[in-house]
Image (spheres, coloured by chain):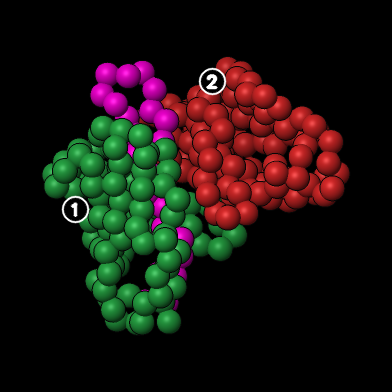
Amino acid sequence: GIQVEQSPPDLILQEGANSTLRCNFSDSVNNLQWFHQNPWGQLINLFYIPSGTKQNGRLSATTVATERYSLLYISSSQTTDSGVYFCAVEANFGNEKLTFGTGTRLTIIP
Amino acid sequence: NAGVTQTPKFRILKIGQSMTLQCTQDMNHNYMYWYRQDPGMGLKLIYYSVGAGITDKGEVPNGYNVSRSTTEDFPLRLELAAPSQTSVYFCASSYLRGLPYNEQFFGPGTRLTVL
């Protein structure tokens, strides 16, 4: 099946810093989503981005499908950004089944 | 819309007990999914359904059963609970037929402990 790798596994930053999280995948995809899992365990949809670039406030994401990677940018980090960020992909002909990466744990220090 | 709802939020089971995790969505989505998340890991697909009456196995189906009698509901059944089933369980739904995209939406999760 398709493989999804996220980097870095852990990231500790000062409040106000910017960060870039990366997701590499091993095959062509129909669907790519970024999620934020907050400290209470809730999964929050950030972006549905199988290709191209999207922005939502301080967050933006870019997927380069031909090179099989996606990037999540967080600018001016706040403590509420802490948590685990997951990338999940659906392979072409994957019947809408998502495969998750193991996540990047982000900790923002005040 | 309430989105995807799950009950219960928490449950402790003894080894060998059975239980059903409930999942309901009110978005008229065709597809529904069950995932489990072990500590420090990403989510793994247990079972999924592409419509009422149709279910299929995911990556980790052993020890679980599902049914889909309506579009809205997709319960997950644990027949003989084992400590290896201690996990957080997420239900998700997606896909309105005819739309060009397929974003999955997740419920709040059920935290299950088997002792």
Residue beneath the point at 61% across and 36% down: A24
Q: Residue A51: which numbered mark, if any?
A: 2
Farthest-out residue, front: B1
Q: Which residues are magenta?
A: B82-104
A69 on left or right of A21:
left
Crowding at dot 2, Cα within 10 Å, few <14 / some 14-19 / many 20+, comes out as some
Q: Position of residue B17 (x, y in %)?
A: 28, 79
Q: Which residue is mark 1?
A: B67
Q: Position of residue B31 (x, y in %)?
A: 28, 37
> Measured along the vertical axis of the image, is residue A69 above or below residue B66?
above
Three-letter amino acid code at the position of disc 2: Ser
Colour used to depict chain B in the structure image: green
Q: Residue B26: which numbered mark, if any?
A: none
> Measured along the vertical axis of the image, is residue B9 above or below residue B18?
above
Residue beneath the point at 29% across and 37% down: B26
Does the magenta-highlighted stretch encompass residue B86?
Answer: yes
Is residue B71 visible to the viewer in this orientation of the structure?
yes
